[in-house]
Image (cartoon, helix red, strand yellow):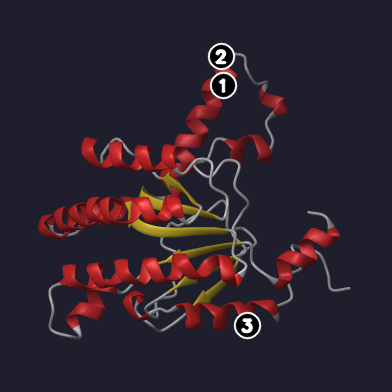
Amino acid sequence: MRDEARAEACRTPAHVAIIMDGNGRWAARRGLPRLNGHKAGADAVRAVVESCPDLGIRYLTLFAFSTENWRRPREEVSGLMTLFRRYLRKESAELVAKGVRVRFIGERSRLGTGLVEMMEALERRSAANDRLFLNIAINYGGRDEMTRAARKLAQAVAEGRLEPEAVTEEHFAGFLDTGGLPDPDLVIRTSGETRISNFLLWQCAYAEYAFVEECWPDFTPDRLAEILSVFSGRERRFGAVSV
């Protein structure tokens, strides 16, 4: 990373990734079913996405559903998939109209055909947009992503398209779901938990982290702006020493 690019990344995070945690706890505290918390969380997504361009954020990655979330009760998983489809039907046209390019990361084969078709349609419709690059991680896990990337890289070597001694970090990164995207500068996790939960393990080698107490449905653009203000005061050395 060039010195001037590094300095700019220290002031304003171009890429923010968020682990949207606490929907279920938000609902439980109010005596509501867990799915009500997920519905409230979808409203928070809309508000945060709309705020990003004005805050200087070019890339936003949201952790929506992990490879481990299939272990949740069947009723909740089914409700979440219905909620994803409903969100895409409701929000797709507005996302496209507002210049948002949407990209989904994660393994798609386990998702329903109808949902995957909706995801792919939105990716195609928004492909020319560049006001905000929104990445939604669904059926995503960092270890799974790296395993799939390693498999693709091994295939390229086996087919003679890449020599083993020519493999670099850049080659490997290109096989990840996030190939072509900049690494996150800042990762935020809501709900007071301090785990990274298998999220963007390769990409976040030098990311800053912010763990906040608010459950995701209570997370607002104003809170995001506060976190960005704190981020701007951090010293990021990327393995080097202070000047």
Looking at the rendering, which quadrant does residue 76 occupy?
bottom left
Q: Which residue is mark 3?
A: 230
Name the residue type under label 3.
Answer: Val
Q: Kindly indicate whether the residue at mark 1 contacts the one at mark 2 (C-beta within 8 angstroms).
A: yes
Q: Which residue is mark 1?
A: 156
| SS label for mark 2 | loop
| SS label for mark 3 | helix
| SS label for mark 1 | helix
Q: Residue furthest front?
A: 97
Q: Position of residue 62 (x, y in %)?
A: 43, 60
In the rendered image, the vertical position of residue 126 relative to residue 219, given as above or below: above
Q: Quadrant of the N terminus?
A: bottom right
Residue at x 48% of width, y 82% of height = 223
Q: Position of residue 211 (x, y in %)?
A: 48, 77
In the rendered image, the vertical position of residue 182 relative to residue 163, given as above or below: below
Looking at the rendering, which quadrant does residue 217 occupy?
bottom left
Q: Which residue is mark 2?
A: 159
Q: Which mark is residue 113?
A: none
Would you say residue 85 is visible in this rendering?
yes
In the rendered image, the vertical position of residue 225 relative to residue 99, given as above or below: below
Name the residue type under label 1.
Answer: Ala
- Packing grade of label 1 (10 A; few <14, some 14-19, many >=20) is some
Looking at the rendering, which quadrant does residue 237 occupy?
bottom right
Front residue of 42 and 152: 42
